[in-house]
Image (cartoon, rainbow, N blue to C red):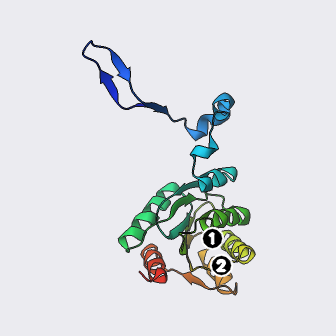
Amino acid sequence: MAEINPLVVTKEGDVLALDAKINIDDNALYRHKDILELRDLDEEEPLEVEASKYDLNYIKLDGDVGCMVNGAGLAMATMDLIKLAGGEPANFLDVGGGASAETVENGFKIILGDPNVKAVLINIFGGIVRCDRVATGVVEAAKKIGVKIPMIVRLAGTNAEEAAVILDNSGLEFLVANSFEDAAKRVVEALGN
């Protein structure tokens, strides 16, 4: 995408581009190694650079609720519900449809790398990915990293009942939400907002 702003037409009729930028779709960069070599990591958010190393879709925001979600649409809806409940999302993080223990661990590292994050909301809909697999990954990652802030978990879909048992038997203090709205409400309550 090319953006020229501002574009000026002089009194003489000349057209001048006073500023411009070009943004290349990340999904096409594998075909354009020459363009990829021009990437200036110093101009990017460090946590976003780190997330790109693990193929995580991450965007840092200004809030205090870390979000780990699968699917861009669910991530957007999760952020909206957090705001409606009175909270502020700290990030957009889509772990994708094949979230493994390693993916979840890397996601936690990225989220917790933001010192503004005071609670984490994990909102997963298990369609392709099984909820029990995600729950196992969440438990393993939380134990390995030593997460010390409130974690609110909402898992729905394939093997959600098995996932609830895994979370309950983990020895960790997860706040398990029963619904989408409950998850947003609980994370805001955990912050004391």
Q: Position of residue 99 (x, y in %)?
A: 66, 61
In the picture as drawn, the residue positioned furthest to the front comes out as 11
Q: Taking 116 as reference, is 173 left or right?
A: right
Task: Determine whether 48 is above or below 155 in the image.
Answer: above
Name the residue rendered at 64%, 67% in the picture.
108
Could you tell me residue 156's position as x and y percent?
54, 72
Q: Where's the C terminus, which quadrant?
A: bottom left
Q: Amino acid at mark 2?
A: Glu
Viewer-proximal residue, 174 or 36?
36
- Quarter residue 130 falls in: bottom right
Name the disc covering residue 102, or none.
none
Residue position for label 1: 131
161 relative to 29, above or below: below
State the residue in front, 39 or 140: 39
Question: What residue does disc 2 label?
Answer: 162
Q: Are marks 1 and 2 in contact (CB under 8 Å)?
A: yes
Q: Is residue 138 visible?
A: yes
Instruction: Say few, some or many: other residues with alpha carbon within 10 Å of mark 1 (under 14 / 14 to 19 / 20 or more).
Output: many
What amino acid type is highlighted by mark number 1? Cys
Query: Vertical placement of 62 versus 52: above or below?
Result: below
Helix or strand or loop: what does disc 1 sit on? helix
